[in-house]
Amino acid sequence: QVQLQESGPGLVKPSGTLSLTCAVSGGSISSSNWWSWVRQPPGKGLEWIGEIYHSGSTNYNPSLKSRVTISVDKSKNQFSLKLSSVTAADTAVYYCASRRQWQDYYYMDVWGKGTTVTVSS
Amino acid sequence: DIQMTQSPSSLSASVGDRVTITCRPSQSISSYLNWYQQKPGKAPKLLIYAASSLQTGVPSRFSGSGSGTDFTLTISSLQPEDFATYSCQQSYSTPGTFGQGTKVEIK
């Protein structure tokens, strides 16, 4: 069973860049899954940020697209998130997740435990 | 973006109760609807995908139904471990938007 683990700084300064990594274990990042990032601001609902395939193909949430970069490192079996020009509104728990596809349907069936990122000076 | 509206936002129920949560997208999404359960401080857990398919390992008291613009998550007999927040997500188009969540509390 695939397991995911997020890592990265818990505190980022305003206007800085948030950088997180998700390590994939128990499976290969070169499988047929897409690899996603989702966030949840305090007391609010979930927001899909974007995803990447092992080939490097990406899809991003249009509301964040200008600030988001998701990349993959197959040699380390991990993928990463960079979010630039952060503000307090980017304070959230950030999750990485594996997106599986069944027929035409897709769903996120494996999630990391999440990591809290606070944007503050 | 497709807006997902859940109702109610919260509910109080007792162990053994039948609980129904509704999710309504702002446009038709066929059966491209997932349900997640989330407990405080924990990651979401997939319960239902493709509107009505039960994820492996999820108890059969959970069921999903609906299509188009009207979906339902039903817990047939609420158990103590089911007190949590439930969220729907559409996978019809990018971005895969989520509902705001329904918190199920102990009565």
Image (cartoon, rainbow, N blue to C red):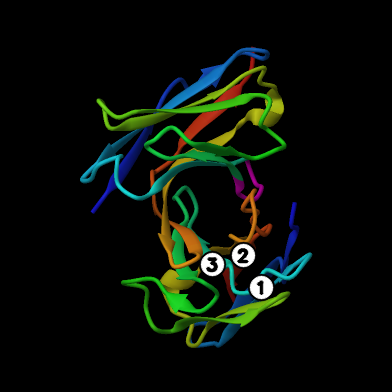
Q: Is residue A109 left or right of residue B93?
A: left
Which quadrant holds the N terminus of chain A?
bottom left
Mark sitting on residue A22: none
**What residue sits 65% from the left and 73% below the top?**
B30
Is the residue marked by circle 2 packed among few (<14), some (14-19), or many (20+) residues within 10 Å? many
* Sequence-earlier tag: 3 or 2: 3
Region of the chain picked out in magenta, as a range: A42-47
Task: Tell me if residue B75 comes above or below residue B40 in the rendering.
Answer: below
Is the residue marked by circle 1 packed among few (<14), some (14-19), or many (20+) residues within 10 Å? some
Q: For the residue marked with disc 1, what is the amino acid?
A: Leu
The spot of residue A19 in percent (x, y) is 49, 21
Q: Are marks 1 and 2 in contact (CB under 8 Å)?
A: yes
Report the front residue among B20 and A33.
Answer: A33
Q: For the residue marked with disc 2, what is the amino acid?
A: Lys
Q: For the residue marked with disc 3, what is the amino acid?
A: Trp
Task: Tell me if residue A61 comes above or below residue B96 in the rendering.
Answer: above
Q: Secondary structure at mark 3?
A: strand
Please identify the dominant SS of the magenta region: loop
Q: Secondary structure at mark 2?
A: strand
**What residue sits 43% from the left and 84% below the top?**
B61
Q: Is residue A82 left or right of residue A99?
A: right
Q: Is residue A113 left or right of residue B13?
A: left
Instruction: Point out the frontmost of discs 3 and 2.
Output: 3
Instruction: Point out the frontmost of discs 3 and 1.
Output: 3
Residue pointed to by mark 3: B35
Residue pointed to by mark 1: B11
Q: Are marks 3 and 1 in contact (CB under 8 Å)?
A: no
CA distance separating discs 3 and 2? 13 Å
Mark sitting on residue B103: 2
**What residue sits 47% from the left and 59% below the top?**
A107
CA distance separating discs 1 and 2? 6 Å
